[in-house]
């Protein structure tokens, strides 16, 4: 019982991280300000890319910001309340998993997790995230395909974290997130290999 009581604050923190990550930002914003169910338009994904394609740059940027904050805030809170670095990484990963499998939509219809992982690891390993962001920018500039740029960033992040001297728990957590990001991009990878992945273009805001 003492062990349970001692770990209850940590479990509550992790639960809060998952619940925050589960908020379907793109779905809420597109419905509230764009009058559209983003799950029924474009790719059907609730992430910033599909929101921007369907509802315009403004709502896409708002979704991106919200999704990044969903990853960053739980880690900031964990760093204030829990001295264990593994707990900080757990908070980042649970927020990320909440975005992938949101309880508020019945564990279905989540996003691909890139922005939420970015937010969490931006707090944990900012220099490594900077390297990942540079890879994203370079690949996107070359082909204007968000999926390819996201995969490049996800691939580089754990390696950069390890090379930049982050503790094993951090780069191992980044590697786990990277694997799940690749899994969620399976259909995009098939289209990239087939040469049929569409380039990114902003949509027009719905009036």
Image (cartoon, rainbow, N blue to C red):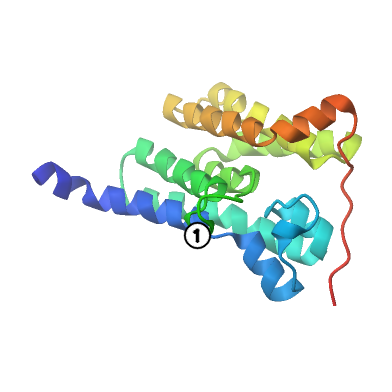
Residue nearer the viewer, 8 or 40: 40
Which residue is rendered at x = 61% and y = 55% of the image?
Answer: 67
Based on the displayed image, in which of its 4 quarters is residue 164 positioned?
top right
- Residue 113 is situated, as x and y percent measured from the top left of the image, at 61, 44
Which residue is rendered at x = 71% and y = 65% of the image?
Answer: 37
Q: How many marks?
A: 1
Q: Which residue is mark 1?
A: 104
Helix, strand or loop at mark 1: helix
Residue 25 lies left or right of residue 51; in this view the side is: left
Which residue is rendered at x = 77% and y = 38% of the image?
Answer: 147
Pick out the residue farthest to the left.
Answer: 1
Q: Quadrant of the N terminus?
A: top left
For the residue carrying disc 1, how many other residues have a C-alpha within 10 Å: few (<14), some (14-19), or many (20+)? few
- Residue 129 is situated, as x and y percent measured from the top left of the image, at 62, 38
Vertical order, 155 against 125 (above or below): above
Residue 138 lies left or right of residue 176; in this view the side is: right
Which residue is rendered at x = 16% and y = 45% of the image?
Answer: 4
Residue 166 appears in the rendering: no
Residue nearer the viewer, 84 or 175: 175
Residue nearer the viewer, 34 or 172: 34
Based on the displayed image, in which of its 4 quarters is residue 132 positioned?
top right
Residue 105 lies left or right of residue 8; in this view the side is: right
- Residue 196 is situated, as x and y percent measured from the top left of the image, at 89, 34
Residue nearer the viewer, 112 or 72: 112
Residue 176 appears in the rendering: yes
Q: Quadrant of the C terminus?
A: bottom right
Pick out the residue farthest to the bottom.
Answer: 207
Vertical order, 174 against 41 (above or below): above
Based on the displayed image, in which of its 4 quarters is residue 58 positioned?
bottom right
- Residue 64 is situated, as x and y percent measured from the top left of the image, at 68, 56
């Amino acid at each position: 019982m003492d062990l349970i009581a001692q770990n209850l604050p940590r479990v509550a923190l992790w639960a809060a991280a998952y619940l925050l990550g589960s908020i379907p930002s793109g779905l809420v914003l597109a419905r509230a300000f764009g009058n559209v169910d983003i799950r029924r338009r474009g790719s059907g994904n609730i992430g910033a890319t599909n929101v921007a394609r369907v509802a315009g740059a403004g709502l896409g940027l708002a979704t991106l910001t919200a999704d990044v904050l969903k990853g960053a805030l739980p880690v900031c809170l964990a760093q204030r309340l829990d001295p264990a670095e593994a707990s900080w990484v757990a908070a980042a990963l649970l927020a990320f998993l909440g975005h992938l499998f949101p309880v508020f939509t019945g564990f279905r219809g989540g996003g691909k997790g890139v922005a939420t992982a970015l937010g969490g690891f931006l707090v944990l390993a900012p220099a490594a995230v900077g390297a990942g962001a540079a890879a994203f920018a370079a690949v996107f500039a070359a082909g204007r395909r968000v999926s390819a740029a996201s995969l490049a960033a996800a691939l580089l992040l754990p390696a950069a974290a390890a090379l930049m001297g982050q503790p094993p728990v951090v780069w191992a957590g980044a590697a786990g997130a990277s694997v799940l990001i690749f899994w969620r991009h399976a259909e995009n990878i098939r289209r990239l290999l087939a040469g049929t992945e569409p380039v990114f273009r902003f949509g027009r805001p719905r009036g």
